[in-house]
């Protein structure tokens, strides 16, 4: 469903950091590398070098003379600058998060937790970046880039002054290191192992600032695929069999403007990001007028209602009030009437990540197409929008709706229809109604599945409404509510 009152999380976060246009209201440190003596010394340098040498077709060392002479280098010079020179720098941005992360690692077990975006995904600068307002690429770690004629290889020229947040320089071999990290069985992350093994054909170094990434097959825009992250060789030097435990609370050096500040960590209570001193991109176009605050503090507050009350008391600088109970019911308060809190409604140009039901097709009965089609017809999102969201949201027809030429207008969402749902369930063999109305097949198995979701006061009522509406189609949905950390762990 397309959410009208809110930005995308990433765009909103950047806007808040950049422009300061907020909804305004008038220590236990993680183990650092030097402090953690629980693990024996380990140095994988020889292992890394041997890995690179064992794959000469993949890891290539060339010269500038090997660059294609007809490359058309781009630098995004004509793209309008993002940011506002009037934005003042300094201060602390106060925010909140529902749960303390289970790890600070960005790969491996539990690394895909909901806090990773705050200290990594929204912070990290990649080889090239998408402009937030234009359909265009802008420089990131690379100051220039070029695409081969066959659209399989992307060439990059790095900025001269690149450094990580720990002050160490970014070098071409750090991109080679990414493949060692992401394909290593030690990270215990099969998805990354599979992706980095299958989706790339070669990486080449031409000089100290020039590299290329080659894909196995042409892509319409290969920049989306060739834009691999960078991995500090010195940081990952101890990557070995005990990686998940050894790196559990180590803070990964970033190329962006903010990093978790170990001196300001309060385990289980708050995490603070501080602006990187002498950040390499601080004076560059697209970056000089953003990332303006000195600190970003996240207090851990499990209850959204409690977070709202803390916002009212001035402990947080803004509150996403897109849900009706906050936008309407809870805003009938003196702080708004007297002008201490301002309400702003943002209309996002591109849709947010969609709210919806994601189906695991690997096991019965969800591996049956007719069951999945029946579930589509059994989900009464129209009623959820009208009742729970008071008409403030719009159902998207696809997860790609709203992206202009990339959206297929002929694909339409299936409207709630219990009759059609039962027709598909019958094709899957579920024709016998039980005493509670839930359908069974000839073997007596109920048409039932478990829906795992966030255990919050905003999401659970929506799920329960969908559950009751699905019963009318003979479908049983067992709602399992988990906190964010446990949910991502299960997924």
Image (tube, rainbow, N blue to C red):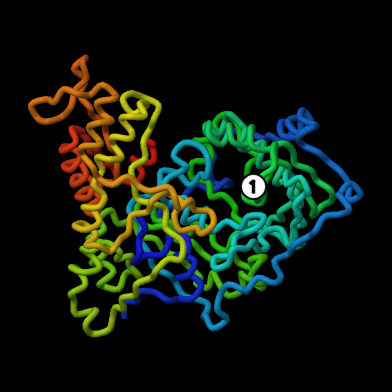
Q: Secondary structure at mark 1?
A: loop
Q: Position of residue 108 (x, y in %)?
A: 51, 37
- Quadrant that contains the C terminus: top left
- 309 or 219, which lies in front? 219
Q: Position of residue 36 (x, y in %)?
A: 53, 42
Q: Is residue 38 visible?
A: no
Q: Is residue 459 left or right of residue 74?
A: left
- 480 or 370, which lies in front? 370
- 88 or 430, which lies in front? 430
Q: Position of residue 13 (x, y in %)?
A: 45, 65
Q: Quadrant of residue 96?
A: bottom left
Give the residue furthest to the right: 65
Q: Quadrant of residue 396?
A: bottom left
Residue drawn at x 88%, y 51% as measured from the top left: 64
Give the residue furthest to the top: 443
Crowding at mark 1 (Cα within 10 Å: few <14, some 14-19, many 20+)? some
Residue at numbered disc 1? 228
Q: Is residue 143 left or right of residue 278?
A: right
Q: Position of residue 186 (x, y in %)?
A: 57, 30
Looking at the image, is 369 positioned above or below residue 135?
Answer: above
Q: Is residue 366 visible?
A: yes
Residue drawn at x 23%, y 38% as measured from the top left: 479
- Quadrant that contains the N terminus: bottom left
């Amino acid at each position: 469903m397309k959410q009208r009152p809110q930005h995308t999380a990433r765009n909103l976060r950047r806007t808040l950091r950049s422009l300061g246009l907020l909804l305004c209201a008038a220590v236990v440190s993680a183990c650092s590398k030097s402090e953690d003596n629980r693990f024996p010394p380990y140095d994988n340098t020889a292992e890394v070098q041997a890995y690179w040498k064992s794959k000469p077709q993949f890891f290539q060392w060339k010269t500038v003379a090997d660059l294609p002479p007809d490359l058309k280098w781009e630098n995004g010079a004509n793209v309008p600058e993002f940011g506002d020179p009037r934005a003042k720098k300094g201060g602390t941005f106060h925010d909140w998060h529902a749960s303390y992360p289970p790890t600070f690692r960005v790969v491996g077990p539990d690394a895909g937790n909901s806090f990773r975006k705050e200290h990594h995904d929204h912070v990290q600068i990649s080889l090239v970046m998408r402009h937030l307002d234009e359909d265009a690429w802008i420089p990131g770690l690379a100051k220039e880039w070029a695409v081969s004629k066959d659209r399989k290889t992307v060439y990059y020229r790095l900025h001269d002054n690149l450094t990580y947040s720990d002050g160490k320089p970014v070098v071409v071999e750090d991109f080679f290191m990414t493949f060692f990290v992401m394909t290593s069985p030690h990270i215990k992350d099969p998805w990354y192992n599979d992706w980095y093994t299958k989706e790339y054909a070669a990486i080449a170094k031409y000089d100290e600032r020039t590299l290329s990434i080659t894909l196995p097959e042409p892509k319409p825009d290969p920049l989306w695929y060739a834009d691999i992250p960078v991995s500090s060789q010195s940081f990952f030097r101890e990557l070995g069999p005990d990686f998940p435990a050894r790196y559990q609370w180590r803070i990964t050096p970033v190329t962006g403007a903010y990093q978790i500040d170990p001196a300001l960590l309060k385990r289980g209570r708050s995490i603070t990001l501080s602006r990187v001193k002498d950040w390499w991109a601080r004076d560059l176009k697209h970056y000089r007028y953003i990332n303006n605050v000195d600190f970003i503090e996240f207090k851990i507050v499990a209850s959204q209602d409690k977070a709202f009350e803390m916002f009212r008391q001035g402990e947080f600088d803004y509150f996403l009030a897109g849900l009706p109970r906050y936008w309407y019911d809870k805003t009938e308060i003196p702080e708004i009437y007297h002008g201490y809190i301002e309400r702003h409604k943002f209309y996002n140009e591109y849709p947010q990540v969609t709210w919806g039901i994601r189906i695991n097709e690997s096991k019965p009965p969800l591996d049956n197409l007719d069951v999945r089609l029946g579930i589509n017809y059994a989900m009464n999102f129209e009623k959820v929008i009208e009742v729970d969201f008071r008409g403030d949201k719009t159902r998207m027809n696809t997860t790609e709706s709203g992206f202009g030429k990339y959206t297929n207008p002929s694909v339409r969402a299936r409207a709630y229809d219990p009759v059609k749902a039962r027709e598909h369930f019958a094709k899957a063999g579920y024709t016998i109604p039980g005493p509670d109305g839930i359908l069974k097949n000839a073997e007596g198995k109920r048409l039932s599945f478990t829906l795992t979701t966030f255990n919050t006061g905003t999401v659970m009522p929506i799920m329960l409404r969908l559950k009751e509406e699905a019963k009318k189609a003979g479908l049983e949905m067992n709602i399992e509510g988990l906190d964010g950390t446990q949910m991502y762990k299960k997924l």
